């Protein structure tokens, strides 16, 4: 398990769909939401540092204009696996890239002002 934890979203993003047959993940838990203003790297770092050791978590990254999970939001990616060993910079860069694609594809303007990254865990 320790070796697997060192690989989860450290050099490349690890998607749940790619690991679903390799590891057993309990998805029956209750959803929790973590709000990170403006997709800030420091917010992602703080989130990762608060994760339990020796545990793999599954997150769904969404973006919301007002930081409310009940308001309209965009899902930036399929479910991502992370651990305390995951690279916050890798996750930050990946989600920024996904956000740029969403802005381009949907013709969204002014998302930089007040947007919140929400990790649904």
Image (spheres, rainbow, N blue to C red):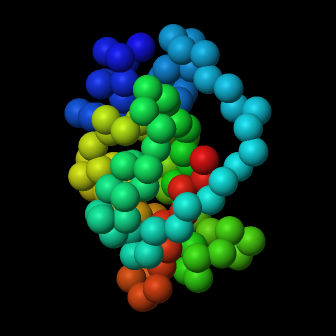
Q: Residue at x 42, y 33 (%)?
A: 53
Q: Is residue 17 left or right of residue 28?
A: left
Q: Is residue 106 left or right of residue 70?
A: left
Q: Residue at x 76, y 33 (%)?
A: 28
Q: Is residue 3 above or below residue 117?
A: above
State the image coordinates of residue 41 (x, y, percent, origin top left). Answer: 29, 63
The image quadrant of residue 26 is: top right
Q: Is residue 13 above or below residue 75?
A: above
Q: Residue at x 59, y 82 (%)?
A: 66
Q: How many marks?
A: 0
State the image coordinates of residue 105 (x, y, percent, origin top left). Answer: 46, 66
Q: Is residue 106 above or below residue 30?
A: below
State the image coordinates of residue 113 (x, y, percent, origin top left). Answer: 42, 88
Q: Residue at x 32, y 39 (%)?
A: 86
Pick whichever, 96 or 116, lies toward us. 116
Pick whichever, 61 or 54, lies toward us. 54
The image quadrant of residue 82 is: top left
Residue 40 visible from this viewpoint: yes
For the N terminus, give its image quadrant: top left
Residue 97 visible from this viewpoint: no
The image quadrant of residue 38 is: bottom left
Pick whichever, 88 or 51, lies toward us. 51
């Amino acid at each position: 398990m320790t070796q697997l934890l060192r690989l989860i979203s450290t050099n490349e993003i690890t998607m749940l769909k790619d690991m679903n047959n390799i590891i057993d993940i309990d998805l029956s838990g209750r959803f929790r939401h973590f709000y990170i203003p403006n997709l800030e790297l420091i917010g992602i770092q703080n989130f990762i540092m608060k994760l339990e050791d020796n545990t793999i978590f599954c997150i769904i990254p969404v973006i919301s204009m007002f930081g409310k999970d009940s308001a309209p939001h965009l899902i930036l990616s399929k479910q991502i696996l992370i651990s305390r060993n995951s690279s916050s910079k890798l996750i930050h860069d990946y989600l920024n890239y996904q956000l740029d694609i969403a802005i381009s594809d949907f013709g969204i303007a002014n998302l930089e002002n007040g947007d919140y990254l929400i990790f649904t865990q």
